[in-house]
Image (spheres, grey):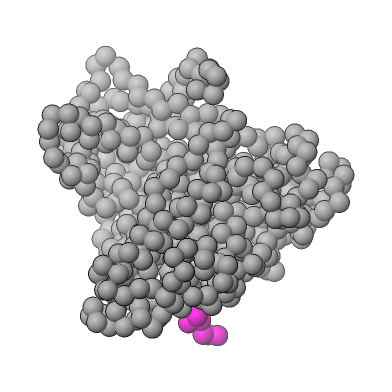
Amino acid sequence: MADEKIKQAIKNGEVALGVEFGSTTVKAILTTEDFKTIASGSYEWDNSLQDGLWTYAIDDIWLGLQTAYSNLRKKVFVDYNVEIKKIKTMGFSAMMHGYLAFDKNNELLVPFRTWRNAITEEASLELTKLFEFNIPQRWSVAHLYQAILNQETHVKNIQFLTTLAGYVHWQLTDQKVIGIGDASGMFPIDEKTGSYSQRMLSQFYSLKSVQQYNWHIQDLLPKPLTAGEVGGYLTEKGARLLDPSGNLSAGATIAPPEGDAGTGMVSTNSVKKRSGNISVGTSIFSMIVLEKSLQHVYTNIDIVTTPTGSPVAMVHANNSASDLSAWVKLFSQFAKMIGSNISTSELYQALFNTALTEAEPDAGGLSGYGYYSGENITAVPEGRPLLVRQPDSEFTIGNLMRFHFFTAFGAIKIGMRILSDEKVLTDNIVAQGGVFKTPIVAQKLLAAALNTDITVMKTAGEGGPWGMAVLSLYTINKKTTQTLDDFLDNNVFINEKYETLSPEPEDVQGFEQFMERYVAGLDIELTAIKTLPSKKEKE
């Protein structure tokens, strides 16, 4: 689309907005109605550890949204000399899971408890046993039940429980709804009804500790909606929240708010049965759309849904590329110290490439864990980023970089082995995330880690916010006979460029050697937690 056509589309409001609240970045993307990105804006943020809990302040949520949108709006004005006054459709997504509880006055009862908190083990185990369905520690119902078990005083006052995406959507539309994919990280979904499992709702209410409250859990949860349904419309209040400048008008059609897993599936065209995708960032999760139910209940496998409600096997690790980024920042500081003006992207590319060109297949004997928080898959309660090497380890930059990729993929590998044993089939796995912006490196090492073909699309760096914009466009373009699968195949990805890499035997063997050290050394990480107190514990 030529610049003049894009300019006219912006003037006419024939554009879509997708916003995603990631772990470290709030990103907004504006697209044309044929899914081309016009501009983007972002806001860097991070969760903080307060009173032993990972959280984001409510004020930061709105600062992040407004800053990301403002940066996008300024970019549009610079590039096209047009002010955004109208948007046809939009949608909001965020990190799944967590706990946002509100009272009858719509006041937040306790600080937002994010997915990163590994504090609900007792509730998780009890509910998994009760439902005969895995309830991970991150899920909203696990947080709710743990608060009940802890006899927290705020529980009696809860009137509404939602996720981060659900909260933002509610404030902009006045609608207490949620996309079914995001809902599936709050409470188990019944595929046949497209809503929360009535059996499990009843089982939850039957618990003695729950019956002391005058609420029913189904009344606390937002209403699940599937892709294509209208989630609401941007209110005047919502328009001012999003754009305090006052330029943006109300009325945009808004898609149901989704979790980052759902937008990841959309942005990688992975909503069909047997399709799979993997997202790499602060955390890492792989998702395969199931043809049939798993034979057993696994505490390392979440059963969530696509944005249309189909069951998905999800392997989620709390930790992935954070420590990789931390080491790159360290090298950046060194570069500045010696007077180098190398750009961040050039530095990432140079360091990443050494993981292929100057590293041994097993990362030279290096081992360790990039754990910034607890890791459920390996039963580690807290995080202590750790690098371990033996005196005869080959401590080179190449091996260091390869080690960080390997440890970023370590926990997810354990969960993926379960799906392999269950003979869960996939036609392809599509990867996305910032680490794939540097060509080949992360893609090749992930192929080795999972011992399967890995595909990266041109949109790999766009990710969730673009996927949310696509879902919003599906909301206004849905035809009765056009499923989301068909919409993605026939409209969105029809001319998509992609590259697929197969694993190389030497790299696969090297990763397996690394994994032997990774599993065997978990006691070292546990010892570090016991002997190296956190800042909070010191205080």
Name the outermost residue toward the front: 245
Query: Where is 527 relative to 476, above or below?
Result: above
In reply to whether residue 479 is colored magenta, the answer given is: yes
- Magenta residues span 476-482
Q: In which quadrant is the C terminus drawn?
A: top right
Point out residue 56 in the picture as x, y percentages from the top left corner: 53, 44
Point out residue 183 in the picture as x, y percentages from the top left corner: 62, 59
One can see residue 9 in this view: yes
One can see residue 226 in this view: no
The answer to which quarter of the image holds residue 155 is: top right
In reply to whether residue 475 is colored magenta, the answer given is: no
Query: Where is 93 relative to 140, above or below?
Result: below
Q: In which quadrant is the N terminus drawn?
A: bottom left
**Main secondary structure of the magenta stretch:** loop
Point out residue 140 in the picture as x, y percentages from the top left corner: 65, 48
Query: Where is 188 relative to 391, above or below?
Result: below
Residue at (20% x, 38% y) in the render: 351
The front one of 386 and 222 is: 222
The front one of 259 and 123 is: 259
Q: Is residue 537 left or right of residue 368?
A: right
Point out residue 6 in the picture as x, y percentages from the top left corner: 29, 79
Q: Is residue 263 left or right of residue 395?
A: right
Residue at (85% x, 47% y) in the render: 213
Residue at (31% x, 48% y) in the render: 435
Residue at (71% x, 39% y) in the render: 146
The front one of 454 and 371 is: 371
